[in-house]
Amino acid sequence: MLPPLKLVKAGLRRTTETLAHELARPGDAAPAWNELEWQLASAAAAAHGVSPLLCHHSAWQNPAWRRFLESQRAHVECRHQRIAQLLRRIDAEARSAGVAMVALKGSALHAIGLYAPGERPMADVDLLVREEDLDLASKLLQALGYVESFAQWKHLTFKPAAGAPVMGLGEHRDTPINIELHTRIQERLPVSTVDITDRIYPRQPSPGLNPYPSNGALMSHLLLHAAGNLCGRSLRLIHLNDISLLATRMLASDWKALWSDGQSPWWALPPLRMVARYFPNAVPRGVLERIEPHCAPLLRALSRRHTLTQVSCSALWLSALPGIEWSRSMQEAGRCVKQRIKPTQEAKQERADMVRTQVWLQGQSWVTLKHGRRLLTWLTRPVPRMDTLYVVREALQHF
């Protein structure tokens, strides 16, 4: 049985914001939380991917909390070793096959030393290949014991032929390592696509795993990924931490990569503002001032006051029209509303794949209702997020 949802909602907001400030500026005394709030703090830390970081960055001494953080760091470190081994195998096979790939996001952040093993969870391995190499790359992964799980507009997802997801709170060393194979680096914000592939793929790639062309290219990808998650109300604190850490290595010339294709990176303003709110001095003021005039007025205004809780799974209730404020015209806003009322066949298939493959959706009657029934429910009462309820239930059971 869950506590009253109003307590869960308030507790998630309070603990999420406290954790964000503690990660950015550690050293505060442990908060005077009750037992439920400590449980919700563990749920928030797991959902936001920061449990192992907090293990060393925070000195709070609640015994159950310390045991949870230390356990998470051990699981993440063990899993990191498995991922590193997998990346070495992929690199060797790709070199042999003459296929050039770019190891994306978490893999790249570890490769340049922003994180030590055990500090940052990685849900999966992301790889970028050229469109013409997609079939060869797919066969390469199959030869490594992977099978295609499902296809989305952003990527192909491969999973190990053997192994099953591990249910529980946070990271587990035995969770299978999925691989997402991309041919484009793009996000829909909310319905129009922003594509930055040309910034990410090296001009002269070599067979095997390649790094990003520059820190500026890596920053562009982190910001676009964060923008997509902001638009979908699924931002994580670890995303903000990634950007803040990389920003400390950025020179003025590195930031110019955001404009490398001649287009204004208007979409980078909300994630940069969010980073600046929680990690003061991480983002140069001049970068924000250069982007601000190109961001739509409504999004520019809302991004000034959004909190992490409001744009992440820490917000308990589902949003009826997530991301509509990212629309750049009335026509685009209308398309967003239309697709929410009448989903495309692609959206229906993506939902079916999620229900089939995501542990946190298993056995939830809400996700299998007809779209009309779900729409009517949204209009008549608040509906809690299934991913949030899953992690809250696991936290309550864990403790």
Image (tube, grey):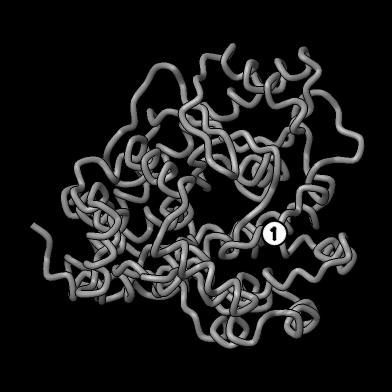
> Where is 150 relative to 236, above or below?
above
**Three-letter amino acid code at the position of disc 1:** Val
Which residue is under mark 1? 194
Image quarter of residue 292: bottom right
Is residue 142 something one can see in this rendering? yes
What x and y, as percent, mark residue 138? 63, 21
The answer to whether 362 appears left or right of 258 in the picture is left
The residue under the point 72% across, 64% down is 247
> Where is 109 relative to 2, above or below?
above
The residue under the point 48% across, 41% down is 123
For the residue pair 253 and 135, the one nearer the viewer reads as 135
The residue under the point 54% across, 84% down is 302
For the residue pair 263 and 387, the one nearer the viewer reads as 263
> Where is 382 relative to 1, above or below?
below
The secondary structure type at the circle numbered 1 is strand
What x and y, as percent, mark residue 389? 24, 57
The answer to whether 173 appears left or right of 34 in the picture is right
Neighbourhood count class around disc 1 (C-alpha, 10 Å): few under 14, some 14–19, many 20 upward: some
The N terminus - image quarter: bottom left
